[in-house]
Image (cartoon, grey):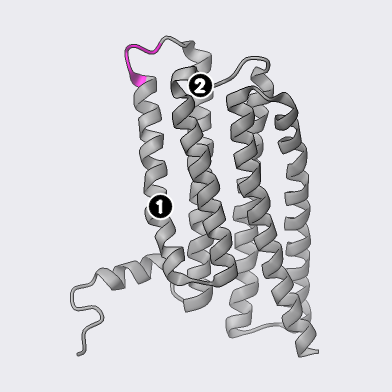
Amino acid sequence: MRDAYHEELDSIGDGLVEMARLVGSAIGRATTAILDADLKLAEAVIAGDSKVDDLQRDLEARAIALLARQQPVATDLRIVVTSLRMSADLERSGDLAQHVAKLARLRFPDTAVPRDLHSTVLEMGQLAQRLMAKAGEVLITKDVDLALQLEQDDDAMDLLHRALFQHLMDDRWQHGIETAVDVTLLGRYYERFADHAVSVAKRVVYLVTGEHADELGQSANTPGAGEAS
C-alpha cells in the first residue's frame, strides 16, 4: 500500500514536470507566432493550452484524493500541498503563453510588434522559455542552489521589461496607441510568465528544506552566517 502511495506522489511530480515542459514550449512558439504573424502556429498554441488545463485538473484531483485517503503528514503533506500550488503557477503560465498567441491572432495578418522591438521581444520570449526549462529541471533534481539562481536570472527579464517601457515612453514613438497597448500587454505577459517560473523554483526550495527561499537568502546574507559560534 505504501509503495502505491509513493508511486502516486511520484506521478504528481511527473505531472508537474510535463506541465513545465508544455508551457515552456508554448511560450517559445507563441513568441514565434507574434513576431512572424504566424496564424497557424498561434492557433496551435491556443488550442494546446487545454492539455495544460487537463493536466492541472488531473493533478489537483489526485492530490486531493491523496489528502483524503492517506492523510499525509510532515514531508508528504508538504509535497502534496506544494504540488497543488505549483500546478496553479504552471497553469497560469500556460494562460500567459495563450494570451501572447491570442494577440498574434488578433492582429493577423499584421504583427503586434514593431520591427524595432522585435529583438527585445524575441529576447524576452527566449528568456521566458529558458527560465521555465530551468524550473522544470529544478522539479526533477530538487537542486536548491539551482532553484535559488532563478530569481537572479529573472533580473534579466525585469531589465528587458523596463527597456520595453522606455521605448514606449520615448518621444520618437511613432507606432500609435493601439500598438503601444499591445506592446505593454506583451511585456506584462512575459514578465508574469517569468515570475511564475521563479515561484515554482521557490516552492521547490520550500519542499526540500521546509524554509521559504526568501528566508534562506536572508540567512545567507546575515553577517557571520555559516561561521562557528
Residue 172 magenta: yes
The residue positioned 39% from the left and 21% from the top of the image is 168
Give the image location of residue 114, x and y in percent. 50, 18
Residue interval drawn in magenta: 169-173
**Residue 132: percent from the left, percent from the top?**
55, 52
Q: Which mark is residue 153?
A: 1
| In the foreground, 123 or 175 | 123
Please identify the quarter of the rendering in which residue 45 is found.
top right
Q: Is residue 102 visible?
A: yes
In the rendered image, the vertical position of residue 118 relative to residue 99, given as above or below: above
- The amino acid type found where label 2 is placed reads Val
Q: Where residue 214 sits in the image (x, y, percent)?
A: 38, 65
SS for tag 1? helix
Q: Quadrant of the N terminus?
A: bottom right
Mark 2 vs mark 1, CA separation in Å: 27 Å
Q: Which residue is mark 2?
A: 181
Dot 1, crowdedness within 10 Å: few (<14), some or many (≥20)? Answer: some
Tell me if residue 110 is in the magenta stretch: no
Q: Nearer the viewer, residue 119 or 226?
A: 119
Q: Which mark is residue 81?
A: none
Image marks 2 and 1: residues in contact by CB distance under 8 Å: no
Lower sequence index among marks 2 and 1: 1
- Left or right, 10 with reference to 176: right
Q: Relative to 69, does residue 14 appear above or below in the rendering?
A: above
* x 59%, y 19%: residue: 111
Horizontal relation, residue 46 to residue 81: left or right: right
Residue 8 placement: quadrant: bottom right
Main secondary structure found in the magenta portion: loop
Is residue 96 visible from the viewing direction of this image?
Answer: no
Residue at the image point whose x is 54% and y is 23% from the top: 182
